[in-house]
Image (cartoon, helix red, strand yellow):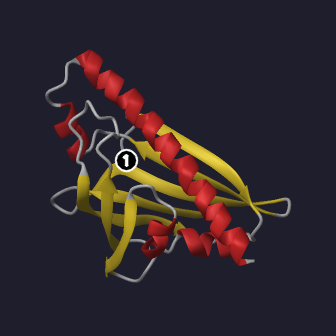
Amino acid sequence: MSSTETFRVDASIAVAADPVTVFGYVSDLTRSGEWSPECQGGEWTQGEPAAVGSVFTAVNHRKPEVVAWAPVVRGEWTTECEIVRSTPPEVFSWAMRDSGGRPQESVWSFTVTPADEGSKLTHTFWMGELTEGMRGILADLDDGAAQKFIVEWAEKLHGDMRHSLARIKAQLESAS
């Protein structure tokens, strides 16, 4: 990983479930359609589920109004991600792969820590060097528009994370 950081976004929530239960749920990416505003789910296409080096192919959908002025993918598309860290019941991370199948510095993580009456769940997104997709989005934007996009994209991700965490909390707490 490089020392460059394009941006980092995170959000946390208290969940009335033990860390093992929370980790088991968030590391099952096939269930991501239950919580994510964009990822509709998918399947493990290489390796064992949730193991470092395994690949998950996700089906995603983005609404037209998301950062509507910017040239981002809309509608349905697929992505591949590779599990880069899986330390039950503490940290689960995956990196988005480029078109050549290499992990990029576009890493999503869930961190679970014990807390009073359950767990604290933190959802993080980190981008180091620009990804293949971000380079494409920013290619035709001037510096001001590129900076505006990064700010608005980080705000969009933060909103998505808060939405995901609320849905994870509801799902886990209704199951207990």
Q: Position of residue 24 (x, y in %)?
A: 59, 75
In the foreground, 171 or 130 = 171
Relative horizontal placement of residue 118, taking residue 65 as reference (left or right): right
Relative horizontal placement of residue 86, taking residue 65 as reference (left or right): right
Instruction: Give residue 89's quadrant in the image.
Output: bottom right
Q: Position of residue 133 (x, y in %)?
A: 22, 45
Residue at (45, 71) in percent of width and height: 29
Q: Position of residue 91 (x, y in %)?
A: 58, 62
In the foreground, 51 or 115 = 115
Circle count: 1
Q: Position of residue 48 (x, y in %)?
A: 40, 83
Residue at (43, 75) in percent of width and height: 30
| In the rendered image, the vertical position of residue 155 relative to residue 131, given as above or below | above
| In the rendered image, the vertical position of residue 43 relative to residue 38, given as above or below | below
Q: Residue furthest top?
A: 144
Relative horizontal placement of residue 100, taking residue 46 as reference (left or right): left
In the foreground, 37 or 138 = 37
| In the rendered image, the vertical position of residue 28 relative to residue 161, given as above or below | below
Secondary structure state at the residue bearing disc 1: loop
Q: Is residue 54 visible?
A: no
Relative horizontal placement of residue 10, taking residue 82 as reference (left or right): right
Residue at (16, 58) in percent of width and height: 99
Q: Disc 1 residue type?
A: Met
Instruction: Give residue 38's quadrant in the image.
Output: bottom left
Q: Is residue 23 visible?
A: yes
Q: Which residue is mark 1?
A: 1
Residue at (52, 62) in percent of width and height: 35
